[in-house]
Image: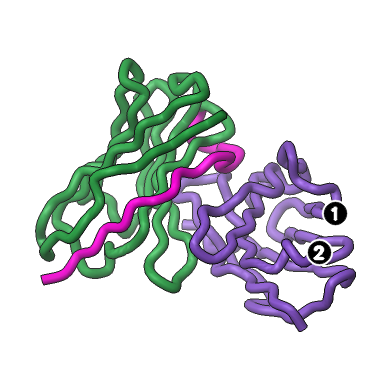
Chain colours: A green, B purple
């Protein structure tokens, strides 16, 4: 059974930084692209970033480009999202999500999701 | 960036109804279109990928069609557990944008 467990969320001040982690199990982590998707309170889904199976290809939403960095450690089956220069509009539940394939673009969607971790940016 | 729109934004339907939701891309995305279902407080669930491929374990009353810029999700006979919000997502070209969602509630 695929399991994705996010951690690292919490309250941070505007301009601050936070690092999210996602521990993966139940599948061959190094064979699949991984995503981060977020959802602001009461709003729709917003795709944030994707990293290829090997980690050599990454893409970002325009809203986070230059501020967020996605990475992975295939030896630890762990996905990361380093978030810098955080803004109030980054407040959301952040989901770690497994891709259907190993490549980044084009791709075939997301077939497994974590339970999400809440990031609140507020003074 | 590719923009995604959905219609309607919400609909009311009864158990047993046939429901159709439309998704449109701002440029051709071939068949790189996915559909998700999300219930309140839960993570989304993949229903359809590559426009018309049913994800494993998803009931056959769900179906998807379309290519290019226009796509449709159809629920052939709405069940009580289908009341939820539905999102389309293009994965043709990053950033992989989602549509704004369609909320399906009980009439």
Q: Residue furthest bottom?
A: B107
Q: Is residue A110 magenta?
A: yes
Query: On what subunit does the disc labeled 2 rest?
Result: B
Q: Does the magenta stretch include residue A98?
A: no
Left or right placement of residue A80 versus residue A113 in this view? left
Q: How many numbered tags mark residues here?
A: 2
Give the quarter of the image for residue B7: bottom right
Residue topped by disc 2: B79
How far across and down, in percent of the image, does residue A32 sit? 49, 26
For the point 13% across and 51% down, the residue is A17
**A120 sits to left or right of B81:** left
Query: Which residue lies under the disc numbered 1?
Result: B61
Nearest to N terminus: mark 1 or mark 2: 1
Specify few, some or many for label 1: CA neighbours under 10 Å numbering under 14, 14-19, or 20 or more. Answer: few
Badge 2 element: loop
Looking at the rendering, the stretch of residues picked out in magenta corresponds to: A103-123
| Along the viewing direction, whichever of B5 and A90 lies nearer the viewer | A90
Say if B60 sits above or below A1 in the image. below
Q: Which mark is residue B23?
A: none
Callout 1 secondary element = loop
x and y percentages locating residue A72 in the rendered image:
32, 28
Find residue A123 and report its horizontal and vertical position in percent.
Answer: 10, 71
* Residue B86 pos. (x, y %): 64, 63
Q: How crowded is mark 2: few (under 14 residues within 10 Å), some or many (20 or more)?
A: few
């Amino acid at each position: 059974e695929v399991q994705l467990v996010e951690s690292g969320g919490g309250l941070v001040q505007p301009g601050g930084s936070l690092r999210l982690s996602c521990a993966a199990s139940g599948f061959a982590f190094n064979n699949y692209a991984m995503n981060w998707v977020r959802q602001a309170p009461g709003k729709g889904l917003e795709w944030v970033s994707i990293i290829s199976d090997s980690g050599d290809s990454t893409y970002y939403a325009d809203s986070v480009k230059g501020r967020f960095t996605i990475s992975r450690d295939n030896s630890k089956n762990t996905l990361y999202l380093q978030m810098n220069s955080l803004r109030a509009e980054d407040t959301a539940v952040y989901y770690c999500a497994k891709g259907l394939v190993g490549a980044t673009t084009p791709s075939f969607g997301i077939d497994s999701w974590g339970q999400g971790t809440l990031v609140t940016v507020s003074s | 960036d590719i923009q995604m729109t959905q219609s309607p934004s919400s609909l009311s339907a009864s158990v047993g109804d046939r429901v159709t939701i439309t998704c449109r891309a701002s440029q051709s995305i071939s068949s790189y279109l996915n559909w998700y279902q999300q219930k309140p407080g839960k993570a989304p669930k993949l229903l359809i990928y590559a426009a018309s491929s049913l994800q494993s374990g998803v009931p056959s009353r769900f179906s998807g069609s379309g290519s290019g810029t226009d796509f449709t999700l159809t629920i052939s006979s709405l069940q009580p557990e289908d009341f939820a919000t539905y999102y389309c997502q293009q994965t043709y070209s990053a950033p992989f944008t989602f549509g704004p969602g369609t909320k399906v509630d009980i009439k």
